[in-house]
C-alpha cells in the first residue's frame, strides 16, 4: 500500500499544474471539515493510464453539499446543488468539472464498529460501480494525499489491460453495462476478461437487453459511436450477438467492419468542404446498415437513433444507393446528370457513398461533384424575375431550374449572364405558348 501511495503522488504531481493544485485545494477543504475526500472512478483510471480527463468525481465521507459550498468559496466556480441526492457539481472556467457525492457514515446501522464503517462507506460507493478499473479511489486530504484505495484489483487490471466486473450479477443488475464494457474495451484498447465476457454472453442469451428501454439502448449506442475505435466496438457487438438481439434483419459482415474502419479517413478527405460539421453518427449508422433490405429500413434505423433529420438522411442514402451507383458506374456521366442526382443528398450521404462503393468511377464522380459542382448556385431569385416584369406563376420555377442547369453546364457565369439567360428563356417560353 505504501508503494501504491508513492506512485500516485508522483502521478498527481505530474498532472498539469492547475489540476494538481485543484486537488490539493479540494483535499484541504476536506481537512477543514475533518472529512476524508477521494477522487474516484474514471479520473483515477485515466491518471494511471496517463490519459487526460477533466471530469473529476469526488467522494466525501460527509455532507457533500456542505463540502461543495465550502470548497466553492475558494474556487469561485459555478455551483449546482442537488439536495434530494446530496450531490453537487462545480464547473470551473477552464472546463474542469467537479462532481461531488456523499458517502455517509451510517451510525445507526453499524453502531458498534465505527472505524470499519468509515471505510465501508467508500467501499459501498465503489462497489456500486461497473468495472474494476473504474472502482479505484485516491485520497486527497493533506494527510494521506495520493493514497490509492483499490478494493477490487483495479490497478492490476489496468496493468493487464482487462475489463472486469466486480461480481457475476453485474450485467443482470444493469444490462447497459454490456455497452459500457464494449466502449471501454475499444477506447482503451483493453480486453474484456474471459469470465466477464461469459457473463455478457449469458446476459444476452437470457434476453436481458429486452429489459432495457429503446431510449437507453440508443443512448448507449450513440456513446459508443461517438467514442474511439468504433470498428472494434461494432465488431465486439457483433461477436456478442447484440445486433441480432436488436433486430433480426441486421447482418454485420467483415465488409461492414472494414468499411467502418475507413470512415474516419473518408470523412477527413471531405472535411475541407465542410467547415467542421460532418455528423459522424449519421455516417456510421448509414454504413452499419448498408445492406439492410429496403423494406426493413425504417424499423431498423429507429433502433439506433431517434433524430428525425438523421433518420431521414440515412433512409435517403440507402434507398437511392443502388440507383446512384448504377448511374455513376459508367465512363461518361455528364455534369447535369451528376448535379441532378447528387445535389439532393446530404454531405454525409456523399461521404457514405464514397466510403461504401468499390468502383473508382463512382469515387471519382463524387469528388468531381464536390470540387466543381456542389457550390454552383444561381444568384437570381423570384424577386429578379418580378423586376423583369415576368408574371408570377409556375413559369418561375421552370426559369430558375433551367438557369441553374445552364450554370452547371458552364454556359453562363455571373448574375448578368443569369438575367440575360432568364430573359431569353422567358421570351422563348412565351413564344411557345403563343403558338
Ligand atoms: P468517461 O466519462 O470518460 O466516458 P467515466 O468512467 O467517467 O468515463 P461515466 O459514464 O462518466 O464514465 O461514469 C462515471 C463513473 O460512474 C464510472 O467511472 C463508473 O464507475 C460509474 N458508472 C457509470 N455508469 C455506470 C453503470 N451503468 N453501472 C455502474 N457504474 C457506472
Image (cartoon, grey):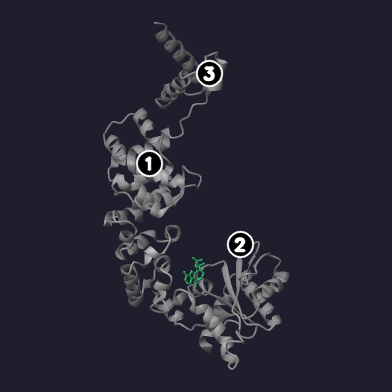
Residue 255: image quadrant is bottom left
Residue 304 in picture, x, y percent from top left? 40, 54
Residue farthest to the right?
73
Distance in Å between CA atoms under marks 2 and 1: 38 Å
Q: Which mark is residue 385?
A: 3
Q: Nearer the viewer, mark 2 or mark 1?
A: 1
Residue marked by disc 2: 95
- The answer to whether residue 301 is visible is yes
Residue 33: image quadrant is bottom right
Residue 38 in picture, x, y percent from top left? 59, 78
Residue 159: image quadrant is bottom left
Residue 97 in picture, x, y percent from top left? 60, 66
In the rendered view, would you say 200 is above or below 93? below
Q: In this view, does 342 lie to the left or right of 140?
A: left
Residue 110 in picture, x, y percent from top left? 58, 89
Disc 1 residue crowd, few under 14, some 14–19, many 20+, Cα 10 Å: some
Residue marked by disc 1: 316
Distance in Å between CA atoms under marks 3 and 1: 33 Å
In primary-sequence order, the first of circles 2 and 1 is 2
Say what secondary structure mark 2 lies in: loop
Looking at this view, is 350 or 208 the one in front? 208
In the image, the residue with mark 2 has its CB under 8 Å from the nearest atom of ligand 1: no
Amino acid at each position: 500500500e505504501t508503494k501504491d501511495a508513492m506512485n500516485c503522488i508522483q502521478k498527481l504531481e505530474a498532472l498539469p499544474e492547475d489540476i494538481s493544485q485543484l486537488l490539493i485545494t479540494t483535499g484541504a477543504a476536506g481537512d477543514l471539515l475533518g472529512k476524508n475526500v477521494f477522487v474516484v472512478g474514471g479520473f483515477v483510471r485515466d491518471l494511471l493510464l496517463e490519459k487526460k480527463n477533466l471530469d473529476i468525481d469526488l467522494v466525501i465521507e460527509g455532507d457533500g453539499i456542505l463540502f461543495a459550498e465550502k470548497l466553492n468559496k475558494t474556487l469561485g466556480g459555478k455551483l449546482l446543488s442537488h439536495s434530494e441526492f446530496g450531490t453537487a457539481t462545480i464547473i470551473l472556467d477552464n472546463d474542469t468539472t467537479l462532481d461531488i457525492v456523499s458517502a455517509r457514515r451510517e451510525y445507526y446501522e453499524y453502531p458498534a464498529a465505527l472505524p470499519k464503517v468509515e471505510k465501508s462507506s467508500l467501499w459501498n460507493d465503489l462497489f456500486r460501480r461497473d468495472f474494476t478499473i473504474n472502482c479505484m479511489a485516491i485520497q486527497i486530504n493533506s494527510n494521506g494525499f495520493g493514497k490509492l484505495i483499490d478494493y477490487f484489483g483495479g490497478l492490476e487490471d489496468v496493468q493487464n489491460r482487462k475489463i472486469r466486473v466486480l461480481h457475476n450479477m453485474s450485467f443482470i443488475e444493469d444490462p447497459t453495462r454490456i455497452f459500457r464494457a464494449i466502449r471501454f474495451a475499444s477506447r482503451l484498447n483493453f480486453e474484456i476478461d474471459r469470465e466477464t465476457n461469459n457473463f455478457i454472453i449469458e446476459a444476452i442469451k437470457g434476453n436481458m437487453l429486452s429489459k432495457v428501454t429503446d431510449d437507453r439502448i440508443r443512448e448507449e449506442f450513440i456513446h459508443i459511436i461517438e467514442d474511439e475505435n468504433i470498428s472494434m466496438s461494432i465488431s465486439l457487438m457483433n461477436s456478442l450477438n447484440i445486433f441480432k438481439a436488436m433486430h433480426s434483419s441486421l447482418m454485420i459482415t467483415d465488409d461492414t467492419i472494414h468499411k467502418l474502419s475507413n470512415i474516419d479517413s473518408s470523412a477527413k478527405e471531405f472535411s475541407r468542404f465542410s467547415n467542421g460539421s460532418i455528423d459522424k453518427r449519421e455516417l456510421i449508422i448509414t454504413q452499419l446498415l448498408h445492406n439492410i433490405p429496403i423494406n426493413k429500413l425504417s424499423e431498423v434505423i429507429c433502433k439506433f437513433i431517434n433524430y428525425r433529420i438523421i433518420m431521414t438522411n440515412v433512409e435517403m442514402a440507402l434507398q437511392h444507393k443502388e440507383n446512384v451507383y448504377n448511374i455513376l458506374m459508367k465512363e461518361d456521366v455528364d455534369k447535369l446528370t451528376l448535379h441532378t442526382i447528387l445535389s439532393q443528398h446530404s454531405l454525409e450521404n456523399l461521404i457514405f457513398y464514397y466510403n461504401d462503393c468499390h468502383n473508382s468511377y463512382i469515387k471519382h464522380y463524387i469528388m468531381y461533384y464536390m470540387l466543381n459542382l456542389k457550390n454552383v448556385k444561381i444568384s437570381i431569385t423570384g424577386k429578379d424575375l418580378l423586376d423583369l416584369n415576368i408574371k408570377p406563376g409556375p413559369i418561375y420555377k421552370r426559369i430558375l431550374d433551367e438557369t441553374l442547369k445552364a450554370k452547371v453546364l458552364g454556359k453562363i457565369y455571373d448574375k448578368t449572364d443569369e438575367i440575360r439567360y432568364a430573359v431569353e428563356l422567358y421570351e422563348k417560353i412565351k413564344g411557345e405558348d403563343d403558338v
